[in-house]
Image (cartoon, rainbow, N blue to C red):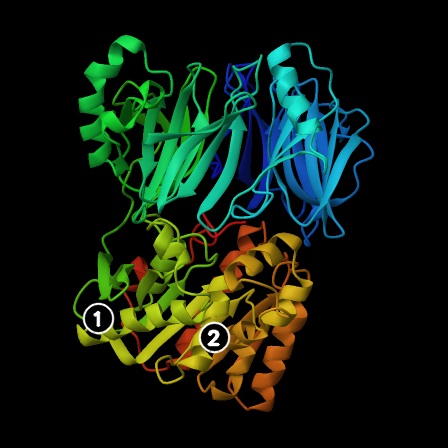
Amino acid sequence: MTQAFQSPGFAALAADRAVETRLVDERWQAVAWDLRTGRRRVVTDRPGGVHLSEIEPDGDAVWWFDADNAGEGRWWREPFTGGAGGEALRDVPRGRTYGVAFDRTGALAAVVVGVDGASHCYVGPPAGEARLIGSAPGYLSLADLSPDGRLLALGGRPDGDDSVVLWPTGAQANDQAGAQAVAQADAQADGPLRIAGDRRLRLWPIEFNPLAALEPELLLVVEEDDRYTVATWRAGTGLRRYPGLSFDSQISAGWYQGPREVLIQHERAGRSRLLLADLDLPEGQRATQQGATQQRATQQGATQQPAAQQGPAEQAPPVREISTPGGTIHDLSCAPDGTLHCVWSRESTPPRPLVLRPGTEAAHHPGQGLDPDQGGTSRSRRWTPRPYGRIHSFVSTPVGEGPWPTLFLVHGGPATHDRDSYDPRVNALVGRGYAVVRTNYRGSTGYGARWQHEYGHRVGLAQIEDLAAVRAELVADGTALAERTGLCGFSWGGYLTLLALGAQPELWSLGMAAQPIADYPAAYRTTTPALRELDRQLFGGTPDEVPERYRAADPRSYVHQVRSPVLLVASRTDERCPPDQVARYAEDLRRLAVPHELLWVDGGHYSRRTADHRSVLATMVRFAEHAWPAPLPLPPRGDRPGVPAELVEGGEQP
C-alpha cells in the first residue's frame, strides 16, 4: 500500500481509530487505520477511486463519498471493523457533496448536497433516515455542525449576503445559552441567521469549538483592511476579531486542544508556517507577555495593535510557532492526543507524512529520508518588479548554462498559488531539457488581499500580462529561448494558456491546455453553481450583466490570432469546464488551419486515477518535442527520469 497524500481523519472519541484516503493500486481509496495495532484495512474498491472519506466521532463507522465522473453521488457508510455497509443517510438525493459534519457524540450527522442549482441541508442519525431542514439557491458549503447538534454553520460567497449562514437543525435545546443561538437564528424573518460580508469584509466560517458545549462558538477567518484575522462568533457577543492574530496573507485555522486554543496555518510566498495561540490569556500573563508576543508575532507576519488601542478583552493572545521544515503543508489534522499529522513536501521532496508534537522540536517523517532529489535540477526564485508589485516565480532548469526551451506551468484557480512543493511535472520536463516556470500571477493567494483582488475585473488579461513580464525577464537574462517559450496549464491555468496564445501570439510558440475554459460565456452557463458564483465575483456580474468583460476575457475572442501549435485535453464528463465549449474551440482551430490536437480522456475534471495523469503528461512531453523538433539535451539513459507515479498534478486538486 502506498503512502497517503491526505492527512488522516481521527475519531474524536476513539483515539485508536482513524480513516485515510490513500493510493491503492494507483486509485484513491478509503482506508480504516487501527492505530493500536497499526493495521490498515482497505474499505473501498471503487474503479474510479474516492477522494473524500470521514470517520464518526465514536469510531464505529467510516464514511466515503461515492461519486461518478461528473462529481455526483452519495455518502456511504461501513463499520470500521468491516461488514455490511449501506447509505450513510437514507433519502438524501444524489448530488454534489458540499460537506459533511457530526455532532460531538456522532448521534447526529449533517450533509449538504447540490442538486438542480440549489444547496440542500439534511440531518439524521448515521445509517438512519435523513430530514431536510432547508434549501437555498446556489452554493453553500457545510462548515460544521455544533457539538450539541442544534446549529449548522454554512459558508457562501465570502463578500456576499450569505457569507456565513447559521441554520437551526430543529434538535432540542437543553440549556439557556445554547438555546439563545438557536432562537436568534429561528427569529430571522427570512429563515436562518445570515452574517453578511461585502467587498471590504470577507468572512469564512471554519468550525465550532468542540469543547463549547453550552454555547456554540464558531471560529472564522475575516479579511478586512488587507489583513486576514482570526475571529469568533457567539450568539451573545456576535462577531469578535482578535487583532493580535492578524496576518498579511492567507491563513486557515482550527481549534486545538485547550478550551480556546487555535492552530493557525499561514501561507506566504509559497511556504507554510504553523502557529498556536490561546484566545484565553490568563489575567496575570497579559502585561508580561504583551511585549514579547508583539515582537514575535510581528517577525512572523502578524500585526499587533499597541496595548493602549486594545481594551482588556483585546490583549494580544500569546503566539508560538511550531517548528517545521521549510516547504508546504498540503493537509493537516490533529489526533486526540494533540499530535499533528501533516502531508508535507518541498520542491525537491515528494509529499510524505510529517508528524509534529507541539512543544517539542521533533518532526517525524515515517520511514523516509528528506531529499531524494538527484541534483539534476537547478532551482531558484524570481521576483519580477512591476509598478503594482513584484511577481513571484519558481524557476527550475537543467544544470548548466541556458538559454533553454521554456515552459510555463500555469496554475489554476485562480485563488490558489504555486508553492515550495514537489511537482512531478517539473522533474519530468526538466529531465527532457526544458526550463520550467511556475508564476504566481495577480489573483493568486499567498501574497495578500490586494494581489488577489485588485486588478479591476480584467479577468485573464491581468494574469497573462504578468506571465509576459516574467517571460521578458527570463529571455533578457539568458534563461529562456525567446523563440521557444510555451504555456502549459490545467483548468483555469489551461484557460490562461488559450487566452495568451490568442492575445499575445508573438510571445508564445506552444500551448497545452487540459480541462480548460475555452469559451467563457458558454462555460459559465453550463458549469457548476459554485463556479458560477466564483465567476460572478471575478467579473462583477454574469455574462448578461457585464458582457464586455466576458468578451475581453474569452479565448474565442482571440482564436483568429492563434498561430502556434495547441494541445487540448478534455473529458466528456467534465462538469466544471464542460466539453462542448472545448470542442467548439478545437473546431475554430481546425477551420483556421492552426496545428492542434484534441485528446479526449476519462475521469471528468480531475481523474482519481494516477495512470490517467501520467498518460496526459506523456502526451504533453511528446507534443512539445514534436512542436520544438530540434534536439534537446538529454541526460544519459540510465539517469533519464520517467513520469513519476507518486503524485498527479502538482497539488492542483479539487
**Depth check, front residue: 294 or 595:** 294
Quadrant of res 506 = bottom left
Where is residue 12? Give x, y as percent: 55, 17
- Tell me the amino acid under the disc marked 2: Leu
The image position of residue 44, as x and y in percent, is 66, 35
Label ID, residue 528? none
The residue drawn where x is 57% and y is 23% is 235
The CA span between labels 2 and 1 is: 24 Å
Mark 2: few/some/many CA within 10 Å (<14, 14-19, 20+): many
Res 444 seen here? yes
Is residue 258 found left or right of 394 in the rendered image? right
Q: Is residue 322 above or below residue 636?
A: above
Of the residues shown, which amino acid type is indicated by label 1?
Thr
Helix, strand or loop under label 1: loop
Residue occupied by mark 1? 479
Residue 504 horizontal/vertical position (percent): 39, 81
The x and y percentages for residue 453 are: 41, 56
Tell which of 473 and 301 is nearer to you: 301
2 or 1: tag closer to the N-terminus: 1
Q: Secondary structure at mark 2?
A: helix
Which quadrant of the figure has residue 638?
A: bottom left
- Asked if residue 619 shows in the view, the reply is no
Q: Which mark is residue 499?
A: 2
